Image (cartoon, helix red, strand yellow):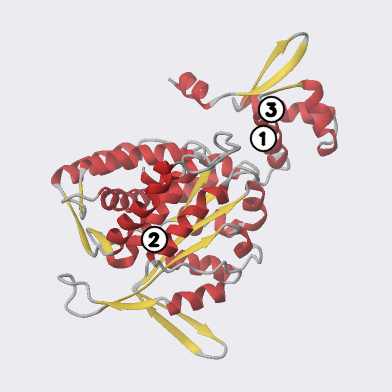
Amino acid sequence: EGYLAYTDSSESPTLYREWVALSTIAAAMERKVWLELGLETFYPNLYVILVGPSGTRKGTAMKPAREIMTEVGMNLTAQSTTKESLAEQLMKAEEMEDLAGVNEELYTHSSVTIYNEEIAVLFKHNDPDLIMWLTDWHDCQDHWSRETKTQGDSQLSGVWVNLLGAMTPELVKAYLPETAIGGGLTGRILFVYSSKKGKVNPLPFLSEEEEALKPKLVHDLELIHQQSGEFGYTKEFLSEWKDWVYEQEKKELFEEPNLDPYINRRRAHALKLCMIVSLSEGGEHQLSLMPENLERVKDILERVERPMPKVFSGVGASSNAEILSNIAKFITERKEVTKTKLLNRFYKDVEDRSHLLDVVRTLRGMNRVKQYQKNGHIMYAIVEEEQLEKDAE
């Protein structure tokens, strides 16, 4: 909430700024806090990628957070373009800490946050090792090793990697290989999608109240950065958690098959977010999960998941997948378009007029586009999310 208030004058969508804030809090927590649930241990790291067309102000949402993280002294990677440079920075981040009251011996961990406004550059080489490494790092392995040609094996203890980046939908399609989309990596990524920027503000100057928030945010993150130990949980939290898990098992969240890996990891994301939300609120119960933490996380997840399938709207085996996505985007940006304007815009991208009308009929059948008449013209417009939810009810 503090970060949203601090960046309120920016044109970046609220959803982007909210997830940048969550990623920043995670960066401050590092591998010094954790949650044990049965035989599993969870750490509060997130892989967050902001996705949207050019001009949706992805970088605008991220830049203030980088300044704050740098001021707090968090381990941020340089704008790396290779997996080797990332691994080197992870090696250099290894620290030994005395977590008072938690460990009798010094606690060793390698905690870094990958911050990259052009994260697609990492994936452009279609490197399977990079995909595997990022997958391993997200799981916070106790021990991780790699072979190098010149220095032999390198080993790390207590790996913890947080990631904040941005991509366009076109680059998701072009640079994320099928092995990543259909495999384990995308299940570990929270794709935060927006089709347009937030409000228009030609004079995005900070007010005095907004400027006064920055040192407060730095102070709070420094306090979070100092926290260490194992999260507990109340009986009420466990009861709410159990009910929510059973409830989610009965739901079909997405019709988009590329999101199946995410659904399989959704519980882990929820627990990580519960820790982040709990610690961000402070108070005497900050290392204990409460029912209200889960309630807040449910709302956070529902809002980010609603537009998530649009990330993959141009990804698919069908030759129509890309044109479907482009036409839907074109209509969305213009609110409504005439049939004539649509034909003039996309006639080069289809085989013939009949092919284009088939694509539009597909969008209408998917309940993405509606058709109507206005002033003697056939018009097309996007079916708004609110209308879809009302129709579903």
Q: Is label 1 in a helix, a strand or a loop?
A: helix
Give residue 10's position: percent from left, percent from top. 52, 42
Disc with the residue nearer the chain's start (3 vs 2)? 2
The CA span between labels 3 and 2 is 38 Å
Q: In the displayed structure, does residue 303 sit left or right of residue 150? A: left
Q: At label 1, which amino acid type do we have?
A: Lys
Examine the rendered structure and indicate whether residue 381 appears above or below residue 192: above
Which image quarter: residue 369?
top right
Would you name the residue on which mark 2 appears? 27
Crowding at mark 1 (Cα within 10 Å: few <14, some 14-19, many 20+): some
Q: Are marks 3 and 1 in contact (CB under 8 Å)?
A: no
Give residue 360's position: percent from left, percent from top. 71, 27
Disc with the residue nearer the chain's start (1 vs 2)? 2
Disc with the residue nearer the chain's start (3 vs 1)? 1
The tally of labels here is 3
Report whether residue 42 is seen.
Answer: no
Which image quarter: residue 344?
top right
Q: Is label 3 in a helix, a strand or a loop?
A: helix
Tag of residue 162: none
Q: In the displayed structure, does residue 46 sit left or right of residue 236? A: right
Would you name the residue on which mark 1 appears? 329
Give residue 228's position: percent from left, percent from top. 24, 65
Would you name the residue on which mark 3 appears? 334
Q: Are marks 3 and 2 in contact (CB under 8 Å)?
A: no
Report whether residue 300 is seen.
Answer: yes
Q: At label 3, which amino acid type do we have?
A: Arg
Examine the rendered structure and indicate whether residue 17 appears above or below residue 44: above
Q: At label 2, which amino acid type do we have?
A: Ala
Residue at x 64%, y 30% (from the top left corner): 332
Nearer to us of marks 1 and 2 is: 2
- 33 vs 383, nearest the viewer: 33
